[in-house]
Amino acid sequence: MIDRKALVSRHNPVIRGFDRYSCLSVGNGEYAFTVDATGLQTYPEEYEEDGVPLGHYSNWAWHTDPNPEGYRMEDFKLTYYETFNGRSVGFPYMPSGEMTEEYKFLKLNPHRLHLGRIQFILKLGDGEPAQKEHLNRTEQVLDLWSGVITSRFELAGKQTTVQTCCHPDKDMIAIHVESELIRTGQLQVAFHFPYGEWSRTGVNWGNSEGHRTDITAGSSTSACLVREMDQTSVAAQILWSDGKLVRNGEDAHRFLFIPEPMSDSFDLSFLSVPTISKAGAVNFQETLNASALYWEGFWSRGAAVELIESSDERAAELERRIILSQYLTAIQSSGSLPPQESGLTHNSWAGKFHLEMHWWHAVHFAYWNRHDLLENSLAWYRSILGKAQETAAFQGYEGARWPKCVPPDGVNAPCYIEPFLVWQQPHPIYYAELIHRITGSIETLELYAEIVFETAAFMASYAEWDEPNQRYVLGAPIAPAQEIYDHATTMNPTFELSYWSFGLSTANAWKEKLGQPRVELWDHVIAHLSPLPVVEGLYVAAETASNTFTEKAGLKDHPTMLAPLGLLPGCMVEEGTMRRTLEEVVQQWDWDATWGWDYPMAAMTAARLGEGKLALDLLLMDKKTNTFLPNGHNYQRPPLPTYLPGNGGLLTTVAMMAAGWDGGPDLAAPGFPQDGTWTVRHEGLIKMI
């Protein structure tokens, strides 16, 4: 039996000083609040330019800029491409680098709305503002077992301690502050509300006249605020213990909480809601209790992996990544929407989410025996099913064609590549199959049957018949998961072919489980899919990418020719060819031009091939995009310092390596090295498909 509290607690992040990349967050999957070293967002400028912006986001809060020109996706001029058999299909294409006003509006709207900055106003003894350089002995600890951040700092020799936590069921944070600065009037709290913006920070302080912030109700210990911004309305409720809330000067969007000067402590709660009628803030102690109860339950249920008894010196670091990745994906990726790649920490791609990344963000929840956290976001697919069906029908296909990078309404904006990607199409079938394997219930089959069958219907109609060669082909136009290839000419990408086989086979198996006849077309496509393209004994990126391993240009981005045996269970794969391909990828690939999920993807392939040592080497490869910061975030590059697909991918891979996979060897932790250097204790994991 694993001592889960000891396992989790030994990886509590401890941050000293103002580390612009290692700010900490609290959240509940639908909502998150990110803080600097003070426990609030006191010095945000230190994090914005070349760090992690201090976000404050909820899945429901989005903003759209004014649209005086009336731009609509329905009116965007389509570009038509001929498919393999000469049929003309329209796409909302915009050449890379081109920017029209119409394109910019459609691309950047709607965007996630920053719910407001909450910061300390710290003053020196003479009343001048205290800069971060004036703070000493700063230290933060995130207690993962309770979900509480405790921050400590000194100003002018006076100690301040701040506890920050998030309610598990409300879009609300609560803080408890103990400080010698209260009696001297050197510590207050400001609430500042920005105009919405698509940028990484999500804030625009230069358009104060473009929105309103009004106090609509209040008492001696509470206030209700309503914000009106174009077509967006947001409300907030603030509770406090001792003090008063006042407007801060002439800024109509800034409010100041002044604590009672006769006390050394105070509590504050801040709740964000769509309308004030949904207000229901609770005090700090109730929030603290709810947070502690939720996180103890989170860590106690589901699965656990412990590596501390391993002799490999990398075990402690891998265990740290495992624990912190579970926390980060729980607070950022477990809500009712597929998450954006930076979660709820800061904006990326205007806050929109990438459906091809949904697998990497969230499938691990099921493998770690928390499938409800994956299912939270699957209802969204049903909500946009009609639009996905309309897209497919407009393009002349059956079923539902899922979009790529979208806001909650599921409408894909114009782009040079996004409308052409298809490897997100089989994802819902994978999710549904995984959940059914866990529940084994007819209710699961009935719940997801429409999504599975509409997805399969599109996939089968998308594959085109090549009469001379008696086979089905995928594309062109098609953008493969390795996005470096021309969508207008690419055909038969390797990963997509294998995923088509998996998806259609699984969908027809569902037909049988529900007592329905198999679909003959689906079986015909499966039986006659083009083989995975091979050049000189190696799987290449696509049939049209024969130079994958002979030209440097083909060795960048994602080595997705490995995915058919790793991420997928090996549909259409010849093991010897995949083994040679893995060896070539390891030796030749430009690993400096990859992304955070490429390392777990390659590691899964190595594990299925029985190469446990190589799997660990790949999973822990020392590369910039495989960096896991002190707060657990997977760093990529300056515009994207947080990348949750890397965290989710690591968790899926570890679950597979520890618990095994369908048809895998009957060994303890079969994906880890079997040479005695790794002692893997685990409980509750689900075997991988």
Image (cartoon, rainbow, N blue to C red):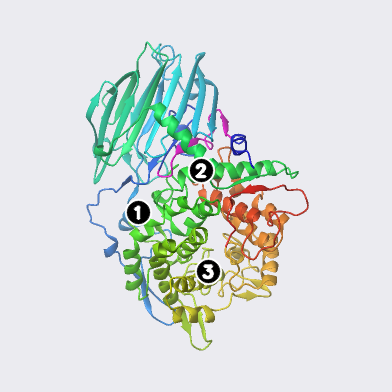
Q: Earlier in the sequence, mark 1 or mark 3?
A: 1
Q: Locate the C terminus and report the quarter of the image it occupies.
A: bottom right
Query: Which corner quadrant of the image does residue 493 belong to?
Result: bottom right
Q: Secondary structure at mark 3?
A: helix
Q: Residue furthest right?
A: 675
Q: Amino acid at mark 3?
A: Tyr
Label at residue 499: 3
Dot 2: within a 10 Å radius of its alpha carbon, few (fewer than 14), some, or many (20 or more) residues?
Answer: many
Q: Which residues are magenta?
A: 12-30
Q: Secondary structure at mark 1?
A: loop
Dominant secondary structure of the magenta stretch?
loop
Q: Are marks 1 and 2 in contact (CB under 8 Å)?
A: no
Q: Secondary structure at mark 2?
A: helix
- Residue 413 picture location, percent across and down: 36, 59
- Residue 397 picture location, percent across and down: 37, 75
442 or 113, which lies in front? 442
Q: Disc 1 to disc 3, how far (Cα)?
A: 26 Å
Label at residue 408: 1
